[in-house]
Image (tube, coloured by chain):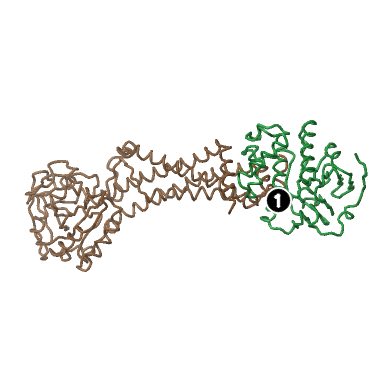
Chain colours: A brown, B green
Amino acid sequence: MGRLPTLAWLALRNLGREFRRSALTAAAMALGLALLIWSRSLADGAHEDWIDAGVRLGEGHVTFTASGYRDSKSLDDRLSAAQLEVALRALGEVEFPDAFATAPPLASVRVETRGLASSPDGALPVFIVGVQPSVEPGFSRLGEEVVDGRYLEEGDRLHAFIGASLAERLGVRTGSRMVLTAQSASGDIEGQLVRVVGTYRTGVQGLDESLVHILLATARAWLGVEGATSVAVLLPNSTFTDPVRGELDSATRPDGIQVVGWPESLPDLYAALQLDDGGDWAFHVILFIIVALAILNAIFMSVLNRKRELGLLRALGLSGGETGLVVYIEGVLLTGASGIVGVALGMVIVFVFFRDGMDLSGLMPDDINFGGIAFDPVMVPVIQARHVVQSVLLTATIGLAASLFPAWHAARLDPAESVKVE
Amino acid sequence: MATNAATRSAADRAGPDGPADHAVRTEALWKIYPQEPRPVEAVRGVDLTVERGEFVAMAGPSGSGKTTVLNLLGGLTRPTRGKVWIDGLELSALPDRKLAAVRQNHIGFVFQSYNLLPMLTALENAEFTLMLQGVPARERRERVLRLFHEIGLEGMEHRRPFKLSGGQQQRVAVARAVLGAPALVLADEPTANLDSTTAEALLDVMQQLNRDKGTTFVFSTHDPRVMKRAGRLIRLVDGRIAEDVVRGGG
């Protein structure tokens, strides 16, 4: 390999000689990579949005529950007051990078139960959540989806915030009274009269027909619960989920507390994202196979056009392998240059859409939802270093693989045949 | 010109001494191309010895096997049967990598046309073999510039091949061929695409290098000017040496 610099120099000069061809080949790869980075960042942005929307419905990025609660969903398996304190203390000890110092994790202590909502017009099954009004506006987006009235405030001891669809089906509206009925911690069926303080519409029918928010204090008193059924925690973003979950799990497991991440607590959303990711990658691989064929064609045609020249290199003392290596280095240099230009171009495109995102509302129907989550038609790209590296590696792999055949062909050229006058 | 001409069989010239004493030696060299309907016997049992410092022309009609012999001597193709020694090294058994090293260090090539690497300047083309041999840059440049001066290429150093005339390109090719101090320069019809004056000038350069530096030249040619200047003329017919005439001087 002592001659590698000479071979690299030759390859570089070859690329320089046919600058237009080289530039066009590199441009195909660079553009492919830039589009890959852009579409990945859009997908990552959309996924982060969906995850955000999903976790804000109540589960958080990580959730503390008592062991057994996730299966039984029974108030018998609630977090005691002592366990609640342990969980909140453990969360306070998690360290985040300085960049997220302004957005610390937000913990929402919740009491949740299934029950019935009744009005003179009828009764419907509902999912009742007791929340802290001081925390919830930063946690849930329900307060931003108000159709009528307002969201809960401190002091709304006997009030409920319900979905507009539920209100329509029960024939109630803001200011109307209705009765919530559920099984309390003691096992008795208990009723609670509440007044509708406001209604919301998320666009997800399942939520709008069943989710009811009341004050945490009201839920505790009504259901006879001291602690909580869960503590949902919002993290700065979803990439913190695994490490934080692991740290919290180690700290709280001895106290009979279970900590799960959003992929476990929102399995439908997780599966939908996996499916979407898989589809994206399959599309990208197909796109890049097409790019690879274009590169293969460009380099291979250049080898065929330079048969005489490559034969001359053999006559001057290059082995078949070295001649092939010259061609391969050309592919490596093209791939490297494309990688640099592609990443730069990709970043530029991403930053163009970074602030306002890309509005696809004209291309899709209203109220579209995905994995049980309302879909935001404005896609804001998010750069994930891991995915940029994956995109670069994919491009590099394809560029280097596409250069193999022309290099192999060049290595196997018959020098005596190649140096014949064409 | 054919004073003291003597005709000998190739077998006579091989003599009893070892291959290392000669620039070139071949023994019962055959090259058969497998073709339908019948294999083509391009070279048929050629025994040839070329001494160091000889200026040899191989002539013969088209298809007589001149270029194939040259390719066999240059290690560009492998013989079907028989052996080739260049500077005492037996080529037929060498693996590709070692054969390439022999071409780099012991053999110089001048082809009929398209001799230069188009992406390199005249100077870079000429020093290319030295570069492969690992000669330091400064020494390479000195050697190239000295030779360019000797063969009338001064001022052409930084021109790309397409900016050089045919004769200038061939002279750069000759410079490249001899700069690596090979035992042998193989020239395949080097004057075929040149006008008469340019061809004579190129032959002057080659003859001068042969005389001054003792470089061995073997040509394949149809050109009577080359044959006239050769110290030895070998005529090939149907892949065999039909005549091998040594004429004094060259």
Q: Categorize mark 1 by other alpha carbons within 10 Å: few (<14), some (14-19), many (20+).
A: many
Which quadrant is home to the C terminus of chain A? top right
The amino acid type, in three-letter code, at marker 1 is Arg
Residue A141 on image: x %, y % = 20, 46
Residue A273 on image: x %, y % = 34, 51
At horizontal 89% and vertical 44% (from top left) the residue drawn is B247
Pick whichever, A194 or A406, lies toward us. Answer: A406
Q: Is residue B63 above or below residue A261?
A: above
Image side of residue A393 versus residue B173, left or right: left
Which quadrant is home to the N terminus of chain A? bottom right
In this figure, what is the number of numbered marks?
1
Rendered image quadrant of residue B113:
top right
At horizontal 20% and vertical 56% (from top left) the residue drawn is A232
Residue B174 on image: x %, y % = 73, 41
Image side of residue A11 versus residue B2, left or right: left
Pick whichever, A207 or A259, lies toward us. Answer: A259
Residue lying furthest bottom? A254
Residue A299 on image: x %, y % = 57, 43
The chain containing the residue under callout 1 comes to B
Rendered image quadrant of residue A66:
bottom left
Pick whichever, B197 or A227, lies toward us. Answer: B197
Examine the rendering and report whether any part of residue A361 can be seen.
yes
Examine the rendering and report whether any part of residue A125 can be seen.
no
Mark 1 element type: helix
Image side of residue A122 versus residue A394, left or right: left
Residue of label 1: B103
